[in-house]
Amino acid sequence: MRSFTITLACALALATTAAPRASENAAAPLTVVAARVSLDGTSNIHAYTASTKNVRVAGIDVAGTPEGDLLDYVLKPGALKGLAVTIPAASLASPKDGLDKNMHKALKVEQFADITFRLRSLVSDGAGYKAVGVLTIAGVEKETTLALQVRRKDATLAITGTTDVLMTDFGIQPPKAMMGMLKTDPKVQIRIELELGAATT
């Protein structure tokens, strides 16, 4: 697999001691309008993709008291303190016949049900944003940086985060098929797409 797309619940994956969680702050809640996580990769025969819209976003942590437009506020340095994007690994599905079974086996979905990205910090790099956090796949945690693109879409923020990972870094053997004739590249790309809005009160 060359890419492993996750729509961080996107931003994917975006202290003050009094920092309230957005879900608990009636004055400044965020809501997930849409989410998608994808995985893209290659093999010696063809490219492939798998994706899911079964995405859970939780732990949205906003520092301080937002002033003015909430969506503009959360993009300020230090404003968005936390975010967790989770997908059931078994929900990843590909349009190619026979791929899902081998992919789910490689991801050890029966032993490790979820793939998770937990945001630790969100910083601007001039051209966009970088989301630094912990990616957990098949029970193995690795610090990961997602390159984020954020754009205002009317009353929502459209966030896309991507990162390349090696399956072997997470203890995953690249899937094989057709009696070993089809071999997948250990490098995959994860893509998280999120659309966040301000919840109505």
Image (tube, helix red, strand yellow):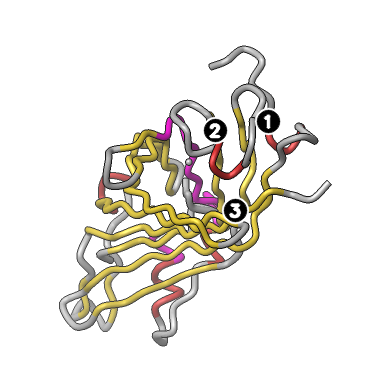
The three-letter code of the residue at mark 1 reads: Arg
| Residue at point 54%, 64% (across, down) | 90
**Is 86 placed above or below 48 here?**
above
Using the rendered view, name the quadrant where residue 69 is placed. Answer: top right
Q: Which residue is mark 2?
A: 82
Q: Nearer the viewer, residue 201 or 43?
A: 201
The residue lying furthest to the left in this view is 44
Judge whether residue 153 can be spotted in this image: yes
Query: Which residue is the extreme one toward the top?
Result: 17
Find the residue positioned furthest to the bottom: 97
Q: Earlier in the sequence, mark 3 or mark 2?
A: 2
Report the number of discs. Answer: 3
Residue placed under numbered mark 3 in the picture: 196
Q: Nearer the viewer, residue 7 or 51?
A: 7
- Using residue 77 as the reference point, say whether residue 72 is left or right of it: right
| Circles 1, 2 touching at the beta carbon (< 8 Å) | yes
Q: Position of residue 3 (x, y in %)?
A: 30, 63
Give the residues drawn in magenta, as a range. 104-122
Which residue is disc 1 drawn over? 21
Rendering coords of residue 75 (x, y %): 48, 39
* Label 2: few (<14), some (14–19) or many (≥20) C-alpha neighbours in 10 Å: many
Mark 2 is on which residue type? Gly
SS for dot 1: loop
Measured from the top left, where is residue 103 in percent x and y? 40, 68
Left or right, 57 with reference to 138: right
Distance Cα–Cα, label 1 vs label 2? 8 Å
Q: Secondary structure at mark 2?
A: strand
Up the image or down, 104 lies above or below 62; here it is below
Is residue 107 part of the magenta span, yes or no?
Answer: yes
Q: Residue at x 49, y 50 (%)?
A: 115
